[in-house]
Image (cartoon, rainbow, N blue to C red):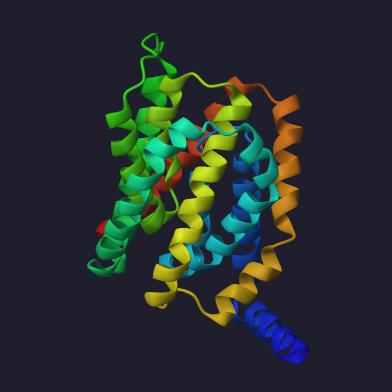
């Protein structure tokens, strides 16, 4: 069995180019940084970057086990600090969103999927820029908004691993403490990511070679998380978000262009 695992790892390593692994390592570190609680929205860069050197489907499959690994690392803290009232509102609709995402995923071509991800990315950038210029004075809770954004988040997370932007629209209105905010979303996305495993396997997105690639990239997970803690202490949030927005714009334009060609 050990020989089989080693053989799969070696085959996976030789099946990809050096540039792919450079992009993949950066992608995983980006996910780890975003999961550390430093800079919501940074994780949206990971899929476009990895997909630039592979197919969208392969990038989705490779990232999924890594997302789950990152979620599990912080689970004890998440459970202790999460807001369970909010989770009861947003989680059930997210499951419905996953099912809709599965239907949508099987009904479109790779070009349409690429275009969709580019549009999602661009819409998030517009949303982020708009919210950065607004003061959210109205903090009244709207359960209907939580359910709508939960379902949308489940959908976009399934087709592109970008469930963060929709649910952020609701979560920012709740005015939670940073630890509660991060922990609530941590549990939310753990449920979503585990919920993708069955459908991804059914759609033949998961195979041993992609799992082997995920294992090769696994050591990058803690690097990204701790690098996020490092950045949070040393870099101005103003300049950080300017950098993120710039790369979001570049990624969205590239994906939309690829989808239209």
> Taking 3 as reference, is 231 above or below it?
above
Residue 55 in the image: state x and y as whole percent.
Answer: 44, 69
Residue in the foreground of this view, choosing between 71 and 37: 71
Query: Picture quarter containing residue 173?
Result: top left
Picture residue at 45% right of the left edge, 38% below the top: 87
> Taking 173 as reference, is 210 above or below it?
below
Q: Quadrant of the C terminus?
A: bottom left
Picture residue at 41% right of the left edge, 10% below the top: 135
Residue 117 seen: no
Residue 4 in the image: state x and y as whole percent.
Answer: 70, 90
Q: Is residue 168 left or right of residue 243?
A: left
Q: Is residue 193 left or right of residue 218?
A: left
Residue 71 seen: yes
Residue in the foreground of this view, choosing between 81 and 236: 81
The single residue placed furthest to the left in the displayed view is 107
Picture residue at 42% right of the left edge, 38% below the top: 88
Residue 85 in the image: state x and y as whole percent.
Answer: 46, 31
Query: Picture quarter containing residue 144?
Result: top left
Residue in the foreground of this view, choosing between 128 and 188: 188
Picture residue at 51% right of the left edge, 65% below the top: 53
Residue 198 in the image: state x and y as whole percent.
Answer: 44, 70
Q: Quadrant of the N terminus?
A: bottom right
> Taking 98 as reference, is 201 above or below it?
below
């Amino acid at each position: 069995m050990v020989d089989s695992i080693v053989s799969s790892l070696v085959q996976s390593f030789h099946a990809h180019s050096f540039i792919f692994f450079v992009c993949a390592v950066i992608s995983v570190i980006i996910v780890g940084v975003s999961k550390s609680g430093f800079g919501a929205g940074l994780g949206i860069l990971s899929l476009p970057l990895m997909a630039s050197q592979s197919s969208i489907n392969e990038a989705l499959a490779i990232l999924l086990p890594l997302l789950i690994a990152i979620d599990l690392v912080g689970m004890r803290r998440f459970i202790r600090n999460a807001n369970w009232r909010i989770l009861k509102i947003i989680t059930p609709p997210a499951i419905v969103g996953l099912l809709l995402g599965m239907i949508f995923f099987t009904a479109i071509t790779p070009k349409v999927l690429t275009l969709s991800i580019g549009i999602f990315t661009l819409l998030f950038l517009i949303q982020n820029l708009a919210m950065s210029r607004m003061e959210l004075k109205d903090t009244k809770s709207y359960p209907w908004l939580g359910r709508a954004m939960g379902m949308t988040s489940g959908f976009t997370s399934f087709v592109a691993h970008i469930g963060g932007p929709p649910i952020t629209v609701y979560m920012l209105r709740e005015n939670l403490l940073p630890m509660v905010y991060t922990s609530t979303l941590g549990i939310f996305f753990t449920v979503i990511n585990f919920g993708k495993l069955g459908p991804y396997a059914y759609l033949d997105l998961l195979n041993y070679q992609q799992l082997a690639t995920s294992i090769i990239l696994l050591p990058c997970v803690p690097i990204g998380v701790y690098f996020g803690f490092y950045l949070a202490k040393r870099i101005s949030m103003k300049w950080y978000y300017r950098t993120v927005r710039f790369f979001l714009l570049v990624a969205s334009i590239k994906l939309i262009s690829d989808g239209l060609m």
